[in-house]
Amino acid sequence: MQLSVEQRGDDLLVAVREDRIDAAVAVQFKDAMRRATESAGRRVVLDLSQVGFLDSSGLGALVAAMKALGPDRRLDLMAPTPAVQKVFRLTRMDSIFAIHPDDASAFGVGTLARAG
Amino acid sequence: MPGDRLTYRRRIDATPDAVRVVLNDLCLVLSALSVAQDETATVELVLAEVLNNIVEHAYQGVPAGPIEIEVTSDDCGLEVRLCDWGLPMPGGQLPPGACPRIAAIPADTPEGGYGWFLIRALASDLSYVRLEGRNLLGFHLDLARAVATA
């Protein structure tokens, strides 16, 4: 499970470098997220633009990743593909997570990016 | 011009990797038959959910038997039939699949229970029978246009 990490001001941008978050990799995703976000600040933004497929196992893993951040940190989602958006919509995950269509709306135009 | 019906049959090991392989294969078959991408995605999702359930619950994560998959086209979409030799469905019935409730606080958000909800939301005519040591699951997936292979 490949994730890439980039500091964006006080936020952490984590990009999923896999095309599926499914039953086959749900546990690996949770573990990788925990490691990647251990020292994250108040917000983690998860870039899902490369993920073409997410099933209920993947959904559960996202919820687990959100809970693992604890009550003082948040997990936002960014750029879900249409198939993944559909799963979010059906399960009303769009009322649990803030879902940003792209980088500009997640971070605001003009946000300074700092190599982390 | 109606063509031949699609009949897709596979027998796979009950492992997550074998499930991925057959899902990819079926998606390629459907795309080649000009099924729309969003509909192919729905077929893939529902198949993933039912197959993962068989792997995790019928076989309890131990691939002690195969899963047989049959997908046939009809006038309004696809009829899917699955057979496995694993444990019977608890209570002999399909789970109701109510949508897990949105929790008041994020920490209480459920991590499970979404699978059957998605299956019931996207598939129709669900049936389950336990017969001679086998689980037989069937359902229909509606498509906008009938699939034809000719």
Image: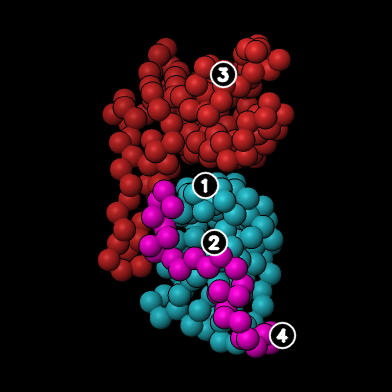
Q: Which residue is mark 2?
A: A30
Q: Which residue is mark 4?
A: A115
Q: Are marks 2 and 1 in contact (CB under 8 Å)?
A: no
Q: Amino acid at mark 1?
A: Asp
Q: Amino acid at mark 4?
A: Ala
| Residue B42 drawn in magenta | no
B114 lies left or right of B61: left
Report how far apart the C-alphas of labels 4 and 2 lie in the structure.
25 Å
Chain for disc number 2 = A
Q: Colour of chain A?
A: cyan
The residue depicted at 43 percent of the width and 31 percent of the height is B123
Nearer to us: label 2 or label 1: 1
Q: Which residue is mark 3?
A: B73
**Mark closer to the chain start, 2 or 1:** 2
Q: Amino acid at mark 2?
A: Lys
Report how far apart the C-alphas of labels 2 and 1 lie in the structure.
14 Å
Judge if badges 4 and 2 mark residues of a common chain: yes
Q: Position of residue A3 (x, y in %)?
A: 66, 66
